[in-house]
Amino acid sequence: MSRPQPTLLVTLTGRDRPGVTSRLFSGLSAHDLTVLDVEQVVIRGHLVLGVLLACPDSPDLTAIHRQVAALADDLGMNVEITLGSGEQSRQRGRLHVTVLGSPGDKVGPVHIGPAKAEALTFTRHGRYINVIVRNPLADPRKYRAEFRAHGLNVSLKLLPVSPSIVGTVVYFGGTGTGAIKVITARGRCFTGGGGSACPVGLRVPVDFRGQADLVFGRAARAGERYESTASATALGEVLHGLRISGKRVSVVLRMLRRRHVTAAEFHITTARGIGKLVSAIPGSWYVYTADPWAAGQVMLWAGRTRHPAPALEPRPAPVPSRSSLPAPAPSATSAPAPSGT
């Protein structure tokens, strides 16, 4: 008779804020765990998040507890971890699906441990092939190889982005891509326009012979810097609802600490009009705006004056006289110009 599988119930409570669930899943991704159930309730801005996890016979409870406790401390939340056994994911009644992880995560149960062998799944539906992203952290070369195995010339990458644009299409280009459709699922990603339809895959015609390049935004792992961002004060970002423009640096830093956010870098403009990143500036300087940097971190744009100085107008280059122009180089018609990559 087989032993019941051990389970862990992780319960986080505290003030609701964007990115709690994605940061929890990112923190647990180093362990071989499977999500059996997720429940969350928000009452008057207070979040209660419960995640039921299946784990191996001998889970490293110390490491898991340390990881979750550090996350809860960083978020200013309380955490409780309870060990149990034998629970199953819910299979009854009407199912309402909310996407809480990265695009392509499986639903009920969802494995959040080491990557599986397949990065994509391909399903034929009439004249189309539905392609679903299963592993949003896979090497882009693996995506390309799996597309190539199905006769498709598609390049797909997923980049770490700030919370409000997780699940959005960062770039979509190529030839003949008008026939490719994006498969979306209603979830907890927020676009700049306030939408919440998250791309989770592609619908590609079976006779597609073009070439496509796509980049999706995914949730960043712990300590990973964002490669594309919205404003730090946008809906879904760490500073949403805060007015920071024109305030002194010392005041804004106190506002950040109350949200458990730090300033990773400061962007300033030198006297010669050159942008520069520095690690510290006087508290008497002023903040202009902020960009997300990584989970719990932002970059502040700041300067000595309350409002940024107007951009320096570039001086037009002198136009050389005809007599000063060099003689034209011989043409090399036999050497084709290199194509861009």
Image (cartoon, grey):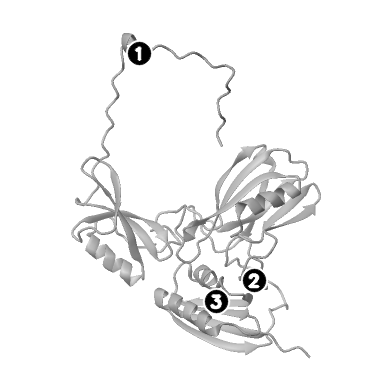
* Label drawn at residue 111: 2
On the picture, is 260 further left or further right than 113? Answer: left
Q: Position of residue 299 (x, y in %)?
A: 35, 57
Instruction: Residue at 66% x, 84% y: name it.
Output: 57
- Helix, strand or loop for disc 3: strand
Q: In front of the other: label 2 or label 3?
A: 2
Q: Is residue 6 above or below residue 91?
A: below
Counting residues from the start of the chain, the first of labels 2 and 3 encountered is 3
> Which tag is nearer the camera, tag 1 or tag 3?
1
Examine the rendering and report whether any part of residue 257 can be seen.
Answer: yes
Which label sits on residue 325? 1
Viewer-nearest residue: 333 or 188: 333
| Residue placed under numbered mark 3 in the picture | 40
Looking at the image, is mark 2 or mark 1 nearer the viewer?
1
The CA distance from mark 2 to mark 3 is 19 Å
Classify residue 193 as left or right of residue 185: left
Give neighbour class at mark 3: few <14, some 14-19, many 20+ (Cα, 10 Å). few
